[in-house]
Amino acid sequence: MNLLKISRKTHKWLMLFLGVQFVIWSVSGAYMVIFDINYIHGNSLVENNQTKISPSHVNYSLNELIQAYPQAKQLSLGVFVDRPVYRFKHEDKRFMLDAGSGELLSPIDKAAAILMASSEYTGSGKISSAELFTSSSSKLPSELSKGYLPAWRINFDDFGSPSLYISARTGELVTKRHEFWRTFDLMFSLHVMDYKEQDISNWLLFFFVTFSLAASVLGLILTYYRIFKSDSLDTQGKQPKEMR
């Protein structure tokens, strides 16, 4: 009977302590399961462009680039909107050059960032605003890694309020977001109980899971008494009339 009393009392207080988090786990888990992960990741927001580069449009040779930037590394040939460009790293900074003329294109301005975002976006919404974020910006979006700075955020007036982030140095699409993805990030942080880094390896989650396991074991003990020892539960705390 001591085990029954201890289990009942401890289970009651543990569930009182864990109950709110159980509800949060249920709601956040349901949200993450209901929505398709490809939609959450915004794969439908942008084109999967596979633009071919015509050699006749590459008039600025690789040798000329190396002569101008002898310490260039991580060099690649790609496309910016509709023109071939070189992208490379030089003295810890990323650069973009027009492969046709050798013109330095980075950092790109607002108009170029809007042009790039418009060419990538698949929706029908119009651009509502554009904002440049740098390392000196007073407030950076949590969804934008500092490694991508400086970057333009191009916001569209469309379902889910989508945003495309364009690197000001390379002109590349570095990340994208919409409200459902932002809500997913919030739900994930609530689910793993790490409200800043969203890291599942944290002590708060460990302790709550440990307490939850303890509450589950105690619940099993109470279930055992309810099914197999129902007489004990009915008479717990009661004394025979002749002993009163």
Image: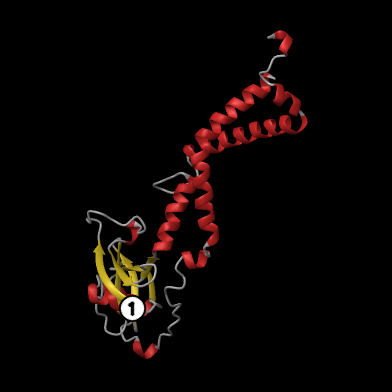
Residue at position x 54%, y 55% from top?
Answer: 30
Q: Nearer the viewer, residue 150 or 75?
A: 150
Q: Using the image as rendered, state which of residue 57 and residue 154 is in the foreground.
A: 154
Q: Which x, y percent locates residue 54? A: 40, 88
Q: Residue shown at 67%/24% (left/top)?
A: 4
Image coloring type: secondary structure
Residue for point 54% across, 61% down? 34
Query: Picture coordinates of residue 142 (x, y %)?
Result: 34, 55
* Whole-percent x, y for residue 66 in the image: 31, 74
| Any part of residue 224 in sight | yes
Which residue is at the front of the view, 22 or 198? 22
35 left or right, relative to 168: right
Residue occupying image coordinates x 47% and y 52%:
188
Residue found at the far front of this picture: 241
Instruction: Pinpoint residue 88: horizontal percent, then vertical percent.
Output: 34, 70
Q: Which quadrant holds residue 124?
A: bottom left
Q: Is residue 194 left or right of residue 170?
A: right
Q: Classify residue 236 by image quadrant.
A: top right
Assess disc 1: are there few (<14), some (14-19) or many (≥20) residues with their C-alpha within 10 Å of its C-alpha.
some
> For the view shown, which residue lies furthest in the top direction?
243
Going by the numbered disc 1, the residue's amino acid type is Ser
> Which quadrant is the N terminus positioned in?
top right
Q: Which residue is mark 1?
A: 118
Asked if 62 appears above or below 206 in the picture, the reply is below
Residue 170 seen by the camera: no
SS for callout 1: helix
